[in-house]
Amino acid sequence: MRIIKRTFLQENIHAFFYFCLFLALGLRLSVAYFLPVKFFFPDALDYHQIALHLVAGEGFALAEHSFAFRAPVYPLFLSVFYQFDLGTLGIRLVQALLGGFSAYLVYHLTLTLLRQRVVALVACFLFACDPLLIVGCSFVLTETLFTFFLLLSFYLLLNVWKDQTRDKGTCLFLGITLGITTLCRASMLGLIPLCLLFLYWELDNKKWRKLSFIALGIVFTMLPWSIRNFNHFGGFVPVTTQSGIILYEVLGPGATGGPRIDTMKFPAESNNLSEWEKDKYLRNWTLNYVLENPDKFFSLAWAKMKRFWNPGFNDTQFKTHPLHWGVFFFFVLLYFYSFRGVFRLKNYSIVLFLLLPILYFALLHCVFMGSVRFRMPIHPFLEILAAYGLYGQKLPEKQLLK
């Protein structure tokens, strides 16, 4: 379904490129400015509270006995605005600007990967019009910042892969960006080794040298936070002490695959434990519970997968919103053309590069909580595939052989 002919886009490529950038920026700034200022999710209150403690000089504490419950990058980001009294509106407007710049990254990532300007333009347009990413800029949540760093990481990863003359500076910068992305959201931790394995498989020249500099950048970025946690807890906590509570929430007794933190009851033995000990106890308790109830694990995984890929909203209060069906049909079409794009691309390295974050986060959230929110960072990769499914041409033979 091509509403606009390829030749028309080719003849007006620069005009449409700037149109897409202004569209992405304009929609996000408008929603950020006019949407009512409120915390829509419990996570936002946590980030807000930690940022206030940072401004007050009390460190990354969420509460009196909670020192590493959230990853540090986003509260640090918020604290800059609170320090200068810019408030929630300032946060939302800057996140809108990040969303606009992310559209620029989507265009150049697609162009570098596929070398087809029309496909890059369509991917940029789809990203600009993505309703969840537009509204997401107005939430005091990690989604916009995490999506930006994830895109930047994959753009640098692509440059190290495609241009094998890249020096140690690019590799080091990639490692630092991967580290920052992980410290923005801990779920990134498992994707890092997959990215390194991808590069090991694809690189021809000086692969160990390049991988070493990437690893150095990651360690350089993440080590201070790990040392801080070790000094406080006396044990290794790479990012957060949240995994035990989340696993109990999504796999323990009464789990539904969705959020239930406000209603669930923890095992009595965990109530008097320290933050780190409680995290370990709940993680081990939940693992034993899953081993005793394997059927429930698979039924919950199915429920989480449906929640994750739901083209509409999971929350009933949003399902009644007038824009619900518009969002629903946008993602139905996006899924269809993304699927088509996978099968039209004959370069399996490119397909793997785009599917790496998509499949990783989809499978991760079959274990952890399934939510439309947690799907948002992979939308740019779906939109690149959908753009190729709509307007992609056969890749040159030389490109296919790479």
Image (cartoon, rainbow, N blue to C red):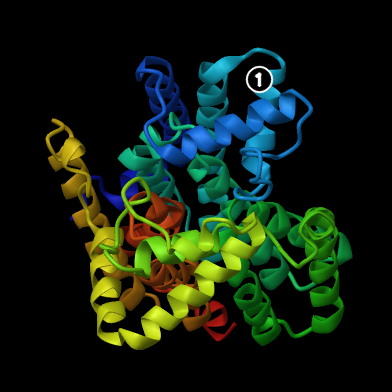
Question: Could you tell whether 180 is left or right of 122 in the image?
Answer: right
Q: Return the residue nearer the eye: 27 or 234.
A: 234
Q: Is residue 18 left or right of residue 341?
A: right
Report the residue at 36% width, 64% height from top: 250
Q: Residue at x 45, y 72 (%)?
A: 355
Q: Quadrant of the N terminus?
A: bottom left
Q: In terms of secondary structure, where does tag 1 sit? A: helix
Judge by depth and name the residue closer to the eye, 270 or 306: 270
Measured along the vertical axis of the image, is residue 1 above or below residue 320?
A: below
Judging by the rendered image, the residue that carries numbered circle 1 is 82
Tell me residue 195's x, y (percent).
63, 73
Q: Is residue 79 above or below residue 99?
A: above
Q: Amino acid at mark 1?
A: Tyr
Camera sees residue 330: yes
Q: Quick one: quadrant of the C terminus?
A: bottom right
Which residue is drawn at the image coordinates 69% and 36% (left, top)? 76
Residue 171 appearing in the image? no
The residue lying at 25 percent from left, 62 percent from top is 256
- Quarter of image, res 29: top left
Binning the other alpha carbons within 10 Å of mark 1 as few (below 14), some (14 to 19) or many (20 upward) gives some
Compared with residue 380, is residue 24 higher up or lower down, i.e. above or below? above
Q: What x and y, as percent, mark residue 317?
A: 18, 36
Estimate the x, y position of residue 88 in percent, counting from the top left. Answer: 52, 20
In-front residue for pair 138/288: 288
Q: Position of residue 391 (x, y in %)?
A: 32, 59
Q: Closer to the camera, 367 or 334?
A: 367
- How many numbered circles does the render carry? 1
